[in-house]
Image (cartoon, grey):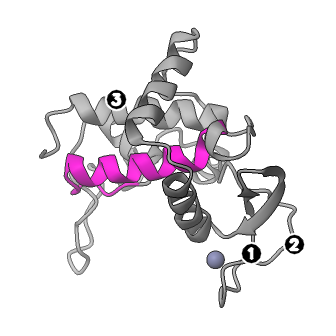
């Protein structure tokens, strides 16, 4: 998972949470170099609050994202394979969906939720957004916003290491937004 500091041995600072604190967030607007460390869910939650208290509106954030794009960085899918894809590639399979996806024989005892037939672009976008393919656009947009808040440099103390992942996420939402495969 990009954005995680894999070598961190910290524990999430959310009270009562014992997951690894792999994600950092600035402690306060006045001390951006001083970090709190959280697990993925809690950094998301923290960033949402941070955003609220910091007074940044969604419109301002959208404008910032728009501006980033105007700086000449095209939004397109980047070919960084996931752990799972790498595992499949080692087995000589480039597209696991050929094996596991639409063309695969369904286990009749298993729910088929999450195996909707989707064009490859939309399927990829859903994976990037860590969304479910039966979600509505409103639900996916919510997920998109949450990811943006975690990944955007303005939201994580100027850390630009998530930039590539951010571009992917922005690209993915654009595909879903334009797609007719999802309900509004
Ligand atoms: Zn936690």
Mark pair 1, 2: CA separation: 7 Å
Dividing the picture into quarters, in which one does residue 17 lie? bottom right
Q: Left of 174 or right of it: where is 80?
A: right
Q: Which residues are magenta?
A: 131-153
Residue 162 located within the stretch drawn in magenta: no
Q: CB under 8 Å between callouts 1 and 3?
A: no
Q: Who's the residue at 87% across and 62% down the image?
A: 7
Q: How many marks?
A: 3
- Few, some or many residues within 10 Å of mark 2 (<14, 14–19, 20+): few
Residue 11 picture location, percent across and down? 78, 78
Instruction: Examine the rendered structure and indicate whether residue 112 appears above or below residue 165.
Output: below
Question: For numbered disc 2, what is the local secondary structure?
Answer: loop
Q: Who's the residue at 59% across and 29% down the image?
A: 79
Instruction: Examine the rendered structure and indicate whether residue 15 appears above or below residue 158.
Output: below
* Sequence-earlier tag: 1 or 3: 1
Q: Who's the residue at 26% across and 55% down the image?
A: 139
Q: CB under 8 Å between callouts 1 and 2?
A: yes
């Amino acid at each position: 998972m990009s954005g995680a500091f894999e070598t961190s041995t910290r524990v999430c600072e959310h009270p009562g949470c014992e997951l690894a604190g792999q994600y950092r967030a600035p402690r306060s607007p006045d001390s951006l170099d001083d970090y709190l460390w959280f697990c993925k869910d809690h950094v998301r939650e923290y960033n949402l609050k941070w955003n609220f208290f910091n007074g940044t509106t969604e419109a301002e954030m959208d404008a910032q994202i728009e501006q980033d794009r105007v700086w000449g960085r095209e939004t397109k899918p980047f070919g960084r394979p996931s752990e799972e894809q790498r595992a499949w590639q080692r087995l000589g399979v480039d597209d696991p969906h050929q094996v596991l996806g639409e063309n695969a024989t369904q286990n009749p005892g298993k729910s088929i939720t999450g195996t909707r037939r989707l064009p490859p672009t939309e399927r990829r976008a859903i994976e990037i957004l860590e969304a479910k393919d039966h979600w509505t656009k409103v639900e996916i947009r919510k997920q998109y916003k949450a990811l943006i808040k975690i990944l955007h440099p303005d939201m994580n103390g100027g850390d630009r290491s998530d930039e590539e992942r951010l571009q992917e996420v922005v690209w993915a939402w654009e595909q879903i937004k334009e797609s007719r495969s999802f309900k509004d």
